[in-house]
Image (cartoon, rainbow, N blue to C red):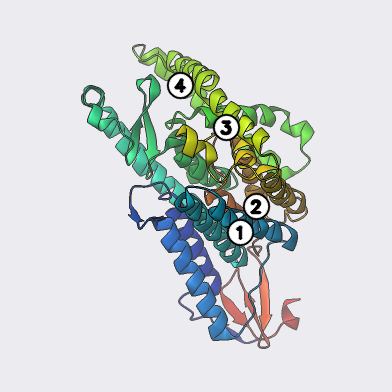
């Protein structure tokens, strides 16, 4: 059997892996101040996604091949219908510029789904590129967070330093909250959650056990109540996972999550004992208490306003971002946001899109990337009950991964009478000898 060494500098899988990593890294900047404001704010993520799409289309026309869209057609059409609803809505509201921004965001998201779903990713390498980026961002962000924490007295006395900014956010209860590369701790936690969940699949390696702990620590430092509640619910689920879940892979992920939670709880207890001046339990309870008060006073008012707006126009709603334009704040609930803005019509299409992905996704859990994306989709759908995230690209990135053409690490490709062995990086000219 003749063996030929593969001299390719980058394989097709390498290129797809690096592009996936580039897109994932850009998602950290979605809410960053590094934007171009031309009436519609263009972020780094928008530029990267558009650039990847152009590269994708250039490759398509150059090779005269067909684009393979792996998103199931029913959910894809549902999202296109939602885009049409947002686009038509521009003409009936008195704030067309805001709705134009929403339309651009929707188009960006559908481009993101199309491109990512067409990537051919090796499972292990695909997981690793996302996880490694998340670890690096978490470590850098956490180090800088503690650097600013040392300057806490100075920040506390200077109101000009309270405003949202890169790395930290001075929030309610006088907490210094980690915001990573953006302006919002909640969004930083939401995107870092992707790296954390995927890292749990790699925890057989000790370095990724440490990496998962560091990512989780950065999520804790956001002091996000919504993420805390979701994390607690997931922890409760892990306790019952061995009886509720038959999948060994999901059991493994749940077990790794449980171990990290227990480890960090023990560290927190030891810290409280060794540094009694810092009352961690008091900080957490005060944060949750202020959150309950905030929900009862502020968010319930917004939710009530959204329901009232929906009742006035139940079929078509009042127009995109109606509550933000009238009350000066987001609804902090995507389901009520869509009901008040686009009525039953928009809500029905959104539910078809989300539940369609859940139903069809459960039939396509063939590797760790797809299983991780499915878990994240469920988490994001819960997150949407207490936050506004539906127009952000995070959900669409994981849906692209969920429907993507992820390969097994040991796959073999046949072409031009040669067989390419992924494990060995050699070309084999005799297929029969390998069977």
Q: Is residue 288 above or below residue 72?
A: above
Q: Badge 2: few (under 14), some or many (20 or more) residues near its Cα, within 10 Å? A: many
Q: Which residue is mark 2?
A: 368
Q: Earlier in the sequence, mark 1 or mark 2?
A: 1
In the picture, the disc for residue 123 is 1
Q: Quadrant of residue 160?
A: top left
Q: Secondary structure at mark 1?
A: helix
Whichever of callouts 3 and 1 sits on the residue coming sooner in the sequence is: 1
In terms of image quadrants, where is residue 403?
bottom right
* Number of other residues with Cα within 10 Å of mark 4, as a class: few under 14, some 14 to 19, many 20 or more: some
User: Disc 4, disc 1: CB below 8 Å?
Assistant: no
Instruction: Write down the residue under mark 3.
Output: 386
In the rendering, at what x and y percent does residue 413 appear?
A: 67, 76
Nearest the eye: 87 or 178: 87
- The residue beneath circle 4 is 268
State how far apart marks 1 and 2 are (Cα).
7 Å
Rounded to the nearest angstrom, the CA distance separating label 3 from label 1 is 32 Å
Q: CA distance from mark 3 to mark 4?
A: 27 Å
Is the residue 368 above or below the residue 311 in the image?
below
Residue 142 drawn at (x, y percent): 36, 37
* Nearest-to-viewer mark from 3 and 4: 3
Q: Is residue 37 left or right of residue 123?
A: left
The count of marks equals 4
State whether residue 71 is above or below residue 347.
below
Q: Quadrant of residue 78?
A: bottom right
């Amino acid at each position: 059997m003749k063996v030929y060494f593969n001299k390719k500098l980058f394989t097709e899988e390498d290129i797809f892996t690096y592009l996936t990593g580039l897109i994932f890294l850009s998602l950290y900047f979605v809410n960053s101040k590094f934007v171009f404001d031309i009436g519609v704010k263009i972020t780094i993520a928008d530029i990267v996604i558009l650039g990847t799409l152009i590269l994708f289309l250039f490759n398509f026309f150059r090779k005269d091949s067909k684009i393979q869209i792996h998103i199931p057609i029913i959910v894809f059409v549902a999202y296109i219908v939602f885009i049409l609803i947002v686009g038509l809505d521009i003409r009936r509201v008195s704030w067309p510029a805001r709705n134009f921004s929403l339309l651009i965001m929707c188009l960006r998201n559908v481009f993101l789904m199309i491109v990512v779903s067409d990537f051919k990713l090796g499972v292990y390498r695909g997981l690793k590129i996302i996880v490694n980026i998340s670890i690096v961002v978490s470590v850098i962000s956490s180090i800088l967070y503690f650097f600013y924490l040392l300057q806490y007295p100075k920040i506390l006395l200077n109101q000009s330093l309270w405003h949202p900014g890169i790395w930290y956010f001075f929030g309610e209860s006088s907490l210094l909250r980690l915001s990573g590369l953006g302006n919002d701790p909640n969004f930083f936690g939401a995107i870092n959650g992707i790296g954390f969940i995927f890292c749990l699949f790699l925890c057989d390696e000790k370095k990724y056990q440490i990496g998962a702990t560091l990512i989780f620590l950065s999520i804790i430092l956001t002091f996000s109540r919504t993420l805390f509640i979701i994390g607690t619910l997931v922890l409760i689920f892990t306790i019952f996972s061995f009886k509720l879940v038959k999948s060994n892979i999901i059991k493994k992920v749940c077990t790794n999550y449980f171990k990290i939670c227990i480890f960090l709880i023990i560290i927190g207890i030891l810290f409280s004992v060794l540094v009694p001046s810092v009352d961690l339990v008091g900080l957490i309870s005060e944060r949750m208490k202020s959150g309950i008060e905030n929900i009862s006073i502020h968010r319930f008012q917004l939710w009530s306003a959204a329901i009232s707006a929906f009742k006035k126009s139940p079929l078509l709603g009042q127009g995109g971002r109606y509550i933000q334009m009238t009350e000066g704040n987001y609804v902090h609930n995507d389901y009520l946001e869509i009901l008040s803005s686009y009525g039953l019509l928009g809500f029905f299409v959104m539910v078809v899109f989300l539940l369609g992905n859940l139903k069809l996704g459960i039939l396509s859990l063939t590797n760790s990337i797809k299983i991780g994306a499915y878990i994240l989709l469920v988490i994001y759908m819960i997150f949407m009950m207490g936050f506004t995230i539906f127009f952000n690209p995070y959900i669409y990135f994981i849906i692209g991964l969920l429907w993507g053409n992820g390969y097994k690490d040991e796959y073999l490709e046949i072409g031009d009478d040669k067989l390419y062995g992924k494990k060995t990086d050699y070309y084999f000219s005799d297929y029969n000898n390998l069977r």
